[in-house]
Structure formats: C-alpha cells, structure tokens
Image (cartoon, rainbow, N blue to C red):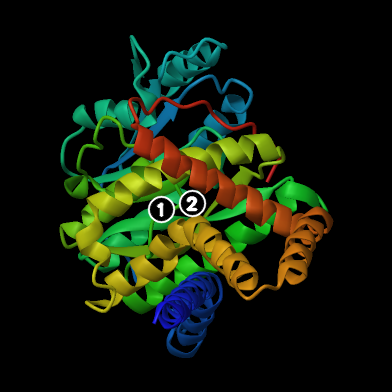
Amino acid sequence: MPGTDYGLYLRSVHALLLLLLIVSLLGVLHTYVLYPYLTLGAAERRCKDASPPGPIGDWPRVHVLMSVHNEAVVLPEKLASLARIDYPGPLHFHLGSDRSTDGSEALLHRFAAAHSATLTLNERRLGKPGTINRLVREIDTDGVLVFTDASVILRPDTVTELVRPMLTDESIGVTDATMVHTGVPGGGVGSLEDQYIRREVALKRAESCLWQAMIGPFGGCWAMRAAAFRPVPDTFLVDDFFLCMSAYEAGWRGAAAPEAVAYEGVGLRLGDEFRRKRRIGAGNWQNLLRFRRLWWPPSRDPLAYAFFSHKILRWLTPLLLSIGGLSLLALLLLDGNYWIAATFLLLMALICAASPAVRYFSAMNVALLLGLVDYLTGIKTNVWQPSHRHQDDG
C-alpha cells in the first residue's frame, strides 16, 4: 500500500535523525565532560606525588630553538628570560627570523653576539615549521631540543625541569611545560581562554601520569630528544603536535613536567583568537589523517583511546553540533512541532547573546569549522602572523 510505504519511510527517517542526534550528543559529551571527568578522577586515585629526584650525573646538551616573525614588542622580555636560564649542562641557542621587518632582527643580533647564539635569517618566508626544520638541520642528533615561542617567558629552571624526566626514564622522548597565563582580566575572552588552558594543563598532566603520553604539548614551550625529531612537512600548520605524535609513532613516550613553568600573556582579542583557532583547525585535520593509525580503532590501546577522546572528538565537535542541531530541528518539523522548532531557534539565539561562555565556545567551534573548509580547499603555505597577546611580568 502506498500509504503504508510512506509511513514506513517516515519512521525510517525519524529513526535515522534520532540516531544522528544521540550519536552527536554523546560525542560532544564524551570529549568535553566524560573523558576529562574519568581521566582526572583516575589520575587522582592512581597518581601520587613522585618522590624527590635523586642526583643526576651528566646533563645532556640542550639546544633552545625559537622562530620569530615581527615580535619586537615581546622580544626584549623573552630574550632576557633566555639569558637567565640556569641549566647545569651545555646550552646553546638557535634563533631564526622569518623575514621580520619590525626591528626583531636587531634584537636577535645583539642577543646572539652576547650569548654566542646561532642566528639564522630566512631569505623568504618559510613559516614557523619551515624555520624550525632549518634550525634543526644545523644540530647534531645528540641532546635535547627545547622549542619556545617569543611570547612565552621562561623561569631560570624551566629548561632543567623539562630535561629532568628524560634522565630518569630513557623511554621518554617528549616533555611538556606547565603554561601559566598572565594578564588575565576579570572576564571576557581572556578569562575564558585562561579557564580552558588551565583545564587542558590538568588533563594533559593526568594523561602523562596514566599513560605516559599527553596528547600534544603546549607549543610555546616543550622539549624532545633530538633523536626523535622528524622534519615537519612543508605545508603542515601545527608543528608541535606533528612532532609529538611522530615521536609516539616511533615508540617514544611523553611526560608532563609540572615544575617546568612558563608564562604567556592571555589572548584578549576575539578576532586574534578566532584567527589562531581557525589556523589550528586546518592543521588539526592534517594531523588527524596523518596519524590515523595512532587513534583508530580507539579501543586498541590507551594512546588511541586518549587521542580519540581528547582530540579527534574535540576536532569533530563543530560537525557533531551541526549534525545534532539540524537533526533535532528536522525531528521537530517532521512531527509538526513548528512552534516548538521556532522556540528552540529563538532560545539558542538568546543563550548565545546572554552567555559570554557560550559565545566563546560557539566562536571557537565556528573557527574550527572554517579550518576544515581551509583544509578541504587546500593548504598551500604555513606562514603565520603572531597573535597579539598581553604579557605582564610573571
């Protein structure tokens, strides 16, 4: 009967929409609520404060690498923090200017002359990953590489604490600093970004303790063994995540270093943070596909589970929210609940207008979605413009 067939079709569509809605909601809830709750809870039960480290004999040679593009505003404080580094082993600085035009190169020249640093000036824009690749080519495969950004201020013992876990465990190839935001306002974008980063710091520390593999370092200050380095592909945007996952792929493990504290000004401009998240979003998709064997299937091992739960679902959240929202709207319309559908749309608009947290969450997910568009249309360059981040004395 035609009417029976049509009714069966409607029920099938209804069931499919309901399934899409449930799967989408579960994906978002897992990455933002369940996974952090379960991981932090497990770490609190199983991870106790480590005993004080014993004496260490020979400290390895450390190479501090920094790529700079037009960051003369923050460079004086940054270079002063590098000069104050108190590391017990051999230490060498490798600085690269990616065609800076704002006076950054003059500051780098003075620092290089005073501290016997290696200074590399790009003849054309290479982007941060390309500049890092060039700097590392001049370094032996021995020792430890410490990557840092111009906007990040180090404490005198930051480098020492980044290296320490590698000396107590030979399987550790990647270590991550503890990022602390400065200049955090009482509200607005800066406060929300700070809350997000503090949550990420705690989650990565828990992953490090439970599985010896935090899912990606904070790109502003982290370290890896020189032997674990693999050149970043020419068009890849998120170099720190690529390098970290490459080390895991090669069999190295990772550790968060709670005492390796670094300071960075919090982002205060929504436009800057949106642009940065969009760029990261495009880079996320590059890494998602490049390292798909590390996260699929998620049940294979703890690294796959953590990678899928912490990052993959997080990167898919814009799509999950879109699919879930459209599925709910379609269900309401399919059932003839037109006024409820209109009320739902109005309610969503009012919540976004009234809640800064919801506006921030929505804006960042739109940025990630546009990053996907950028990835699908083709990424031809990885050159970047530094964010304008406030920096107070930390």
What crowding class fits label 2: few (fewer than 14 Cα within 10 Å), some (14-19), or many (20 or more)? Answer: some
Q: Are marks 1 and 2 in contact (CB under 8 Å)?
A: yes
Q: Is residue 75 above or below residue 207?
A: above
| 12 relative to 231, above or below | below
Q: Secondary structure at mark 2?
A: loop
Residue 192, image x and y in percent? 70, 55
x and y percentages locating residue 302 in the rendered image: 29, 76
Q: Amino acid at mark 1?
A: Thr
Q: CA distance from mark 1 to mark 2?
A: 5 Å
Q: Confirm whether residue 368 shows in the render.
A: yes
Q: Secondary structure at mark 1?
A: helix
| Residue that badge 1 annotates | 160
Among the 4 quarters of the image, the one containing residue 56: bottom left
Q: Is residue 3 left or right of residue 225?
A: right
* Residue in front for this viewpoint, 300 or 99: 300
Q: Is residue 86 visible?
A: no
Residue wearing tag 2 = 157
Q: Residues within 10 Å of mark 1 (few under 14, many from 20)?
A: some
Which quarter of the rendered picture does the N terminus lie within?
A: bottom left
- The three-letter amino acid code for the residue at tag 2 is Asp
Residue that appears at 26% across and 51% down = 289
